[in-house]
Amino acid sequence: MPSPARTVDVGGTAPYRIHIGPGLLDDGTLLAGPLRGSQALLVSDSQVAPRYAAQVAEALRRARPGIAIGEFVLPAGEASKTLDGFAGAIDALATLGARRDACVYALGGGVVGDLAGFAAACWMRGIDCVQLPTSLLAMVDSSVGGKTAVDLPRGKNLVGAFHPPRAVIADTSVLATLPPRELRAGLAEVVKYGALGDAAFLDWLEQHAEVLLAMDQQALADAIARSCAHKATIVARDPFEHGERALLNFGHTFAHAIETAQGYGGLNHGEAVAVGMVLAARLSEALGLAPATDGDRLRTLLQHFGLPVALPDGLDPEQLLAHMRLDKKAQAGGLRFIVWRGAGRAEVLSDVPESAVLAVLRAG
């Protein structure tokens, strides 16, 4: 018998609820709940849309007869998260004749969620968006918190807006069709929550690694709910990343530089975050902030989940450093990194010496 849906509430000035459980994409009442008008644009990609778009549209029509539903499908992959892709979504909203009470439904992984959310943020200066994440990574990270963006050749997520969703509906049933590589990528972001603020969660992940890799529904739902609760707590206190929310970027300064240097065609986001967290732990050790044993433990856990833990071959440390200078987390005074003082104790560190970063990058 399927387990009941879990919910996590995100507070702040624009509160919303995260729903986590099996079979939710068939629940028309839940899907249509946030819809204030009679128009919906379903944004998806070429891998997800053939599997689930018709199912979602049918569920919405059952709950709201007469609803007008448009569809925009991106080619799958980070390379589609561009201004051209954004323009396509905006054009689809125009074709739908979307009014202020229309809603964008983002059905897919992080690429779809980021781009669709940005289109919703910009159409008529902001319409509603509902996130329907279909990857583990999107369920635990990108669908929650209202960050929306597209990439430029010069860097990742450089054009975007904060635009909280009206709801997040994470149907864990869809994870059964998730390729193993995408499952592992999501687990990297799950590990991140333990690394930055919950050492006990790292213990739990070590104990449940095998069942998580085996796609055990109960364990996955527990991991998703716990990750979302961590992010919800931080986002409610710092919705626009003026302080504490930056901790959620543990490993991401390195990761974004890797993704940019590879032209978004090498490591996927979760894999790059895994490498980035190992490098952030190594930087913390080099700066005398954290013991090597905690970094070794993190590296071992990530390897257990089948994730890369070293820089890919062929990347130039100087080029990676140049990308970091343009990263959104950099400041006028110099590079800013999320470091840690050991498992579960991350903090923001400004004015990090470039020489220390280069030394870590050269060590790979």
Image: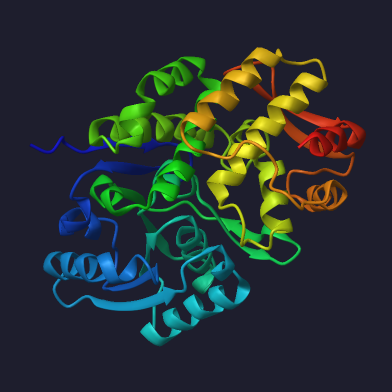
Decide if residue 173 is on the left or right side of residue 8. Answer: left
Q: Residue at x 51, y 65 (%)?
A: 77
Percent position of residue 364, x then y: 76, 37
- Quadrant housing the N terminus: top left
Decide if residue 73 is on the left or right side of residue 271. Answer: left
Q: Nearer the viewer, residue 195 or 38?
A: 195
How many labels, in total? 0
Q: Quadrant of residue 55?
A: bottom left
Q: Is residue 91 visible?
A: yes
Q: Is residue 29 above or below residue 337?
A: below
Percent position of residue 287, x then y: 83, 21
Q: Is residue 172 above or below residue 110?
A: above
Decide if residue 155 is on the left or right side of residue 241. Answer: right
Percent position of residue 66, x then y: 17, 78
Q: Residue at x 40, y 75 (%)?
A: 73
Q: Nearer the viewer, residue 39 or 140?
A: 140
Residue occupying the far front of the picture: 313
Q: Quadrant of residue 9?
A: top left
Q: Is residue 76 above or below residue 354?
A: below
Q: Residue at x 59, y 17 (%)?
A: 343
Q: Residue at x 32, y 69 (%)?
A: 49
Q: Which scheme is used to colour this image of the protein?
A: rainbow
Q: Is residue 196 visible?
A: no
Residue occupying the far bottom of the picture: 95
Residue occupying the far left of the picture: 1
Percent position of residue 207, x then y: 38, 18
